[in-house]
Amino acid sequence: MTDKYELTTLRDIFEKVPLHKIDECMKELTALMRECKSVEAAMKGFAHITTGDADNASCIWPEPVTWVDDGKGEVSANVSINDVHVATLNVDP
């Protein structure tokens, strides 16, 4: 059975994720955060080129984040524009 953890704060990781799984959880969350920041940088660059204003683009970190303890090491993030899903990014940490 695959365990899922709804995480909003660092305290959630501390309280919900078993001790022997914290490293794996943090590795995957780090990969997700790095990917989201990279997408945000690309979006800001595109917005600056097309509109002259990089502030037109941003990434919103989801609350909560669902960490799936499936041992696969896969990370995915949904990309939406104006609340319309346009892509899913998959990352291997």
Image: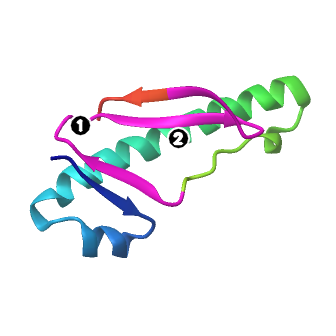
Q: Which residue lies furthest to the left in this view?
A: 20
Instruction: Looking at the picture, tell me which residue is in the foreground, 2 or 52.
Output: 2
**Residue at coordinates 23% horizontally, 37% vertically from top-left?**
73
The image shows residue 1 at horizontal and vertical percentages of 15, 47
Q: Would residue 74 be counted in the magenta stretch?
A: yes
According to the image, label 2 marks what residue? 36
Is residue 27 in the magenta section?
no
Evaluate if marks 2 and 1 touch, with contact meaning CB atoms under 8 Å apart. Answer: no
Residue type indicated by callout 1? Gly
The boundaries of the magenta stretch are 63-88
Q: Which element type, helix, strand or loop, lies under badge 1?
A: loop
Q: In this view, does 42 lie to the left or right of 3?
A: right
The answer to which of 31 and 69 lies nearer the viewer is 69
Q: Main secondary structure of the magenta part?
A: strand
| Residue shown at 45% from the left, 66% from the top | 8
Residue topped by disc 1: 73
Query: Residue 90's x, y, as percent?
Result: 41, 28
Rendered position, 27 above or below 11 = above
Task: Tell which circle, 2 or 1, labels the residue nearer the N-terminal end.
Answer: 2
- If the image is split into quadrants, where does the C terminus sit? top left
Using the rendered view, name the quadrant where residue 19 is placed: bottom left
Q: Callout 2: few (<14), some (14-19), or many (20+) C-alpha neighbours within 10 Å?
A: many
